[in-house]
Amino acid sequence: MKPVVVVGAGPTGLTAAVLLQELGVPVVVLERHAAPYALPRAVHLDDEVHRVLQAAGVADAFAGVSRAALGLRLVDAQHRVMAEFRRPARGAHGWPGANLFDQPDLEALLRARLAAPPRTATVTGVRAGAAPVVETDGGDVEASAVLGCDGAGSTVRAAVGARWDDLGFSETWLVVDVLCEAELPVWDGVTQVCDPARAATVLRVGRDRYRWEFQLRDGEADLDVGPLLAPWTGGREVRVVRRAAYGFAARLADRWQEGRTFLLGDAAHVTPPFVGQGLGAGLRDAHALAWRLARVLHGRAPEALLATYAQERRPHARAQVRQAVTAGWAMTGGQDRAAAVRRAVLAGVVRVPGGTALLDRGSPALRGSALTRGRSAGALPPQPGVAGRRLDDVVGPRFAVLTTGAVTPGLQAVADRLEGVALALGAAPADPLSAWLRRRRHAVVVLRPDRAVLAAARDEAGLRVPWGLLTDP
Ligand SMILES: Cc1cc2nc3c(=O)[nH]c(=O)nc-3n(C[C@H](O)[C@H](O)[C@H](O)COP(=O)(O)OP(=O)(O)OC[C@H]3O[C@@H](n4cnc5c(N)ncnc54)[C@H](O)[C@@H]3O)c2cc1C
């Protein structure tokens, strides 16, 4: 089999490469920079995305280099608390609800999982199609598939014939990352300053790492940050490690696939950071595409399965970008004339009836493909413990047929046909997956390798599996 060529060794490309490698697919990663990018960039991911890292085999190591954050706090211009949205220390997916980290630490963990380090090469074009060819400054590379994980300025995007859809957000913020050995009087989570004069975000990223983001006004290129940091640092000395004006935009590529060439991560979507989902969306893309591609390349599913990647991921990414745009508008507008409207909108973004925070409810279910048509299909249910281990570790990168009853021969046959595993969840009443199934009146669920529901029902007779897309063509 020719290798899958992954263009770009950012977090998306590295995750995709590691997941494909685990699935027995040969991979070559091409990266234009010889050394990893050392400066901080994205800083947050949630418990759903932590589960993707679990699939990539770095979840525990990531827990060691990240910080479980308390949640989101909104403060006014005088730093008085207006609202607080707590995130659980252990969320429904078995990991902290909010994780803050330094992007180079995450990338180092993923790189260490690669069988072969990225090759230094600049990709100049892709001849897309059923047998794609990647053009580089060092010659052509034939591929069984090409994954464009080459960031917001993607070269592969042009090869796919994609253009940006603008989702209506354009601001420039000054991002200031600092190191400080002394404990600063900063809340252990994300603090959003809703000041109409200058919105700001303050994060405690790690033991000695902090970040400030300040909204720049039209015409401003930079700021004197000393006076802006002073209320937060209490006179303690801090060392600035990155200070850069960074453009927050909301864009979605209008197509994500041409033949066997795909877009993932920032190459396919960019978002303002207000709900902390930018990097995570790229990891979700990688998880969604890896099992499909492996299945097709190993000859176990028809080519048509590949189209379901963009059909599902594009609307999901769009929904998360829109949520970020709305949250940004509401949070950074502050207490101006429209404050009441903004706060009402914000309440809609972070809260739903019954007092449950939307952020805790998780991301929307996947929709849009023939794999998401049944009841509960496309949802991402919680991860329970099974026999003292996390479910995903027990199941591995396979389909899983799970039941609150016993594994019948019929359920085992479904698992066998999918080359997956069948498991009884047992009667543990606290098991969050069993509780989730009970609430939806299901007793049986089939999970895909990316942990989204493929089918769910009261019993095996009710299971509707779209076999045609998943089994030997
Ligand atoms: C300078 C910068 C600052 C950022 N700051 C923030 C921030 O403050 N907050 C925040 O939330 N997010 C920030 N981000 C965004 C965040 O880092 C991304 O969402 C995240 O890295 C997405 O990962 P990715 O793997 O999809 O893309 P990227 O991390 O952009 O990785 C793409 C990789 O592809 C490589 N590449 C690109 N073109 C080619 C080519 N033609 N040939 C070979 N290799 C190629 C690049 O060198 C890069 O290593 C920043 C991004 C950048 C680039």
Image (cartoon, rainbow, N blue to C red):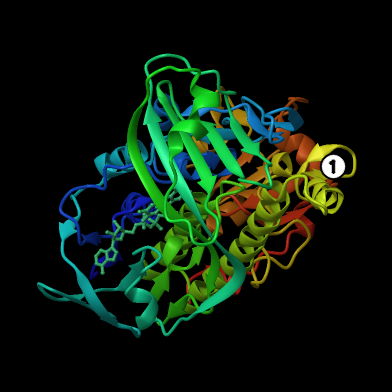
Q: Quadrant of residue 238?
A: top left
Q: Is residue 72 left or right of residue 152?
A: right
Question: Is 270 drawn above or below residue 347 in the view shown?
Answer: below
Query: What residue lies at 35% left-to-right and 70% top-to-bottom?
Result: 154
The residue that disc 1 covers is: 439
Q: Is residue 126 left or right of residue 77?
A: left
Q: Is residue 42 left or right of residue 249?
A: left
The quadrant of the image that shows the N terminus is: bottom left
Query: What residue lies at 89% left-to-right and 44% top-to-bottom?
Result: 353
Q: Position of residue 125 (x, y in %)?
A: 25, 80
Report the residue that reaches farthest toward the right: 354
Nearer to us in this view, 260 or 421:
260
Q: Dot 1, crowdedness within 10 Å: few (<14), some or many (≥20)?
A: few
Nearer to us in this view, 449 or 261:
261
Q: Position of residue 107 (x, y in %)?
A: 32, 43
Q: Is residue 419 visible?
A: no
Nearer to us in this view, 388 or 231:
231
Question: Is 379 drawn above or below residue 298 in the view shown?
Answer: above
Question: Is 165 drawn above or below residue 94 in the view shown?
Answer: below
Q: Position of residue 258 (x, y in %)?
A: 42, 82
Q: Position of residue 237 (x, y in %)?
A: 37, 20
Nearer to us in this view, 358 or 229:
229
